[in-house]
Image: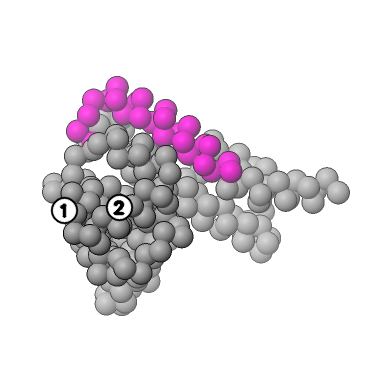
Amino acid sequence: MPEGSPPFDPSHDEEAMADPVSSDKQLANRMLAGDEQAFEDFFGWHFPRLYRFALKRLGHNHDEAEEVAQATLCRAIDKLKTYRGEAPLFTWLCTFCRHEIGARYRKLQREPLEADLIEDLPEVQGALDSLALSADDPEDSLRRKEIERLVHVTLDRLPFRYGFVLESMYIRGLSMKEIASELRVSPKAVESLLTRARQAFRDAFSGLVGGLTGADSGTAGS
């Protein structure tokens, strides 16, 4: 995590998960009214999640991810009047973040990186197995890409700490001790956090991927 990032506050995650669109619209209205605390909340809630969103798309370059997250928030503040509350604020912010990432790659004349698929998570492996995907079948390749997209949609919408701990373990291959050091908590706290993160991922991912696997199951059984 960047040195200047705000400390973790569990209440931020819980409050945002309760009714994201409603609370996001209230936050935006407070910001437009000039509420200084609202700006602090905006940065505290969304900088860590945008940082992680950018990190995996920038080859885990921490400096670039921090710059992109900051640029995204600044651009979003300039455009805040256009936010209508029709989707969660983070979804809206991701649009700006993808633009910033794309602009950075174009400037460097490089191809954007694809985010890794976390196959080690049982929920993901189960979804892949249920489709019996073949590497040689173009349609199966498209299904796999859709599952990959749903994995990252799920991760990007989890509370920051949940997404961070899952990616740290299953993509970056860090140990409990290394994750604890990055989060500035004890390994025991990371173990507890990982358990909650996997449950949250399982609940969210199963809802998204159910239509894909269910549609195929129905086809297979007909």
Question: Is residue 189 visible to us here?
Answer: yes
Separation of disc 1 and disc 2 at Cα? 11 Å
Upstream in sequence: badge 1 or badge 2: 2
**x and y percent of residue 198 in the render?**
45, 34
Pointer 2: what residue? Answer: 27
Q: Does the magenta segment cover residue 76?
A: no
The one of 95 and 110 positioned closer to us in this rendering: 95
> Label 2 sits on what residue type?
Leu
**Image: 67 above or below 153:** below
Residue 52 visible? The answer is: no
- Residue 37 in the image: state x and y as whole percent: 18, 49
* Mark 2 surroundings: few (<14), some (14-19) or many (≥20) residues within 10 A: some
Q: Quadrant of residue 163?
A: top left
Type of amino acid under label 1: Glu
Secondary structure at numbered mark 1? helix
Q: Mark 1 points at which residue?
A: 36
Q: Residue at x 73, y 50 (%)?
A: 216
Give how far across and how far down residue 24 sits, in percent: 36, 52
Q: What span is in magenta?
A: 183-207
Q: Is residue 193 magenta?
A: yes
Q: Percent x, y for residue 192?
A: 36, 25
Q: Which of 191 and 196 is in front in this view?
A: 196
Secondary structure under badge 2?
A: helix
